[in-house]
Amino acid sequence: MTYSSSLLPYNLRCLGEHWLAVSSSGDHIFLDDAEAESLRAGDPQSLPLSTQAALKSRFFLRSEPESLGSARLLAARRSARHETLKTGPSLHIIVPTLQCAHSCQYCQVSRALEDNGHTMPLNDLYAACDSIFDSNAPALTIEFQGGDPLLRYDLVQAAILRIVARNEVEKRSIRFVVASTLHQLNEDMCDFFKQHQVYLSTSLDGPASLHNQNRPTPTRDSYQKTIRGIGLARQHIGKDSVSALMTTAQISLKHPEVIVDEYAYQQLPEIFLRPLSLYGFAKRNQTRLGYTLNQFQMFYERALDRIIEWNRRGVYLREVYASIILNKILSPFDNGYVDLQSPTGAGSSVLVYNYDGYVYPSDEARMLAETGDTSLRLGKIGTSLAKLQESPIQQSLIQASLIEHSRDCRTCVYNPFCSPNPVDAQAQLHDLYAPASSTEHCQRHLWLFDLFYRRIRQADDNLLDLYYSWAQPDSVGE
Ligand code: SF4
């Protein structure tokens, strides 16, 4: 019997000394120049049998005639990467107020404590809570953002009670998250949060010297108050009740190691090294506050090395951005990170109910509205989910995020896991359909995927184990 095979779709990218090939299932292989040339020439039969076998098991090659089992397996692998988009919105962000005790220079949205005009009316809050159940998703995450939601704890409490009451009938799996400075957190709040299994998420930009400079308050003790809040939450709600993330400001760039060390000292199991968003106020102050992608890359790699060093010493610390990328590369089950979905998860898997009475497709879209660009509003709070999904803006977001509609993405080796980000394109270039390669989103993710493929190739067994543990879907934040 003659063995023959044909090539399935794939893309190639040169990573310095080696070539990276990624198949449409998202599986990858590293090739040398000659092997890459054989593949490009459509002559995989000239490759050693072991390489052909590897290519076949990773969906680069199929036998002729194709077996039904292998076609089904490929379809299932592709489908698993889009699983989170099928159930309807599962992440619902409620913004009860923009008030905040901090006055961070780079913050896009917050308003001073005495500013009362930026808080959600109760009728909108209840309408938002009820709308959440329009989604068919069996598991719902409801996240309170701000400003600082704990400055309007009354609204947070009212929303949680309303959702819990409705869920007596709905019986969904519900997870509540409150993103806060934790400055206002007290024992009564902790008791309520414990009763309703509410998780807390806070910001920690490093040790006191960095955090207090980055997140100023009139009393210059934002670090001390946040650390007190973390301690209180752990004591009253539970050891794992609070997580933290950091925003990389210009002053952070020189201090990656001390920032990582602070997370290890505070026994936080994860750190999210987020670049500064270009939206809003930060964009207007870019020369004073901003930095280049290259500067962020140097900061990130030094911080990542320090995190790996802590893990080698036996202290588990996970970098969330790395987990998102490694989940895409190493796990067949996509965690559904909203910015890397095609079609976009903005509006499809995430909805934001803003204090201004409108529903937005993502947190970035509502931040953009604060700068005067309200073009991404999906509709008023209370509009049915079906109408929001049919809205012209949601349809445009979907069209603008399709790989097949983007010349840059169609031939990009990372297209099984990535996509154009129309919200980013609108914020940066005022054009949902701007070429993907002209966006900061594309440049950053191209670099991140390059970085982690290179690191995976060079990793020893211990490091690979760590990368696989970070890649598990459960371990990746939304
Ligand atoms: S956005 Fe950029 S990195 Fe992502 S698939 Fe498109 S071209 Fe590739």
Image (tube, rainbow, N blue to C red):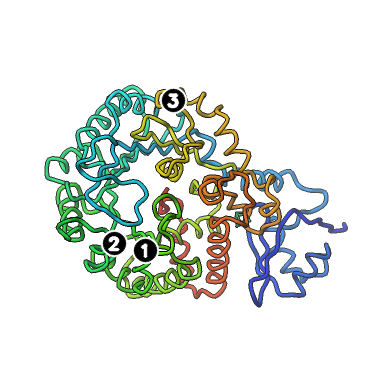
Q: Callout 2, which amino acid?
A: Asn
CA–CA distance in space, label 3 to label 2: 39 Å
Secondary structure, mark 1, is loop
The residue that label 3 is drawn on is 134
Q: Callout 1, which amino acid?
A: Ala
The residue that label 2 is drawn on is 214
Structural crowding at the residue carrying mark 2, measured as other residues with C-alpha within 10 Å and reported as few (<14), some (14–19) or many (≥20): many
Q: Position of residue 32 (x, y in %)?
A: 71, 75
Near-viewer residue (146 or 57) = 146
Left or right: residue 165 versus residue 443 is: left
Q: Is mark 2 within 8 Å of ligand 1?
A: no
Left or right: residue 219 versus residue 39 is: left
Structural crowding at the residue carrying mark 3, measured as other residues with C-alpha within 10 Å and reported as few (<14), some (14–19) or many (≥20): few
Residue lying at the far bottom of the rendered structure: 17
Tell whether label 2 touches label 3 (CB within 8 Å).
no
The residue that label 1 is drawn on is 249
Tell whether label 2 touches label 1 (CB within 8 Å).
yes
The residue drawn where x is 55% and y is 65% is 447
CA–CA distance in space, label 1 to label 2: 7 Å
Residue lying at the far left of the rendered structure: 187
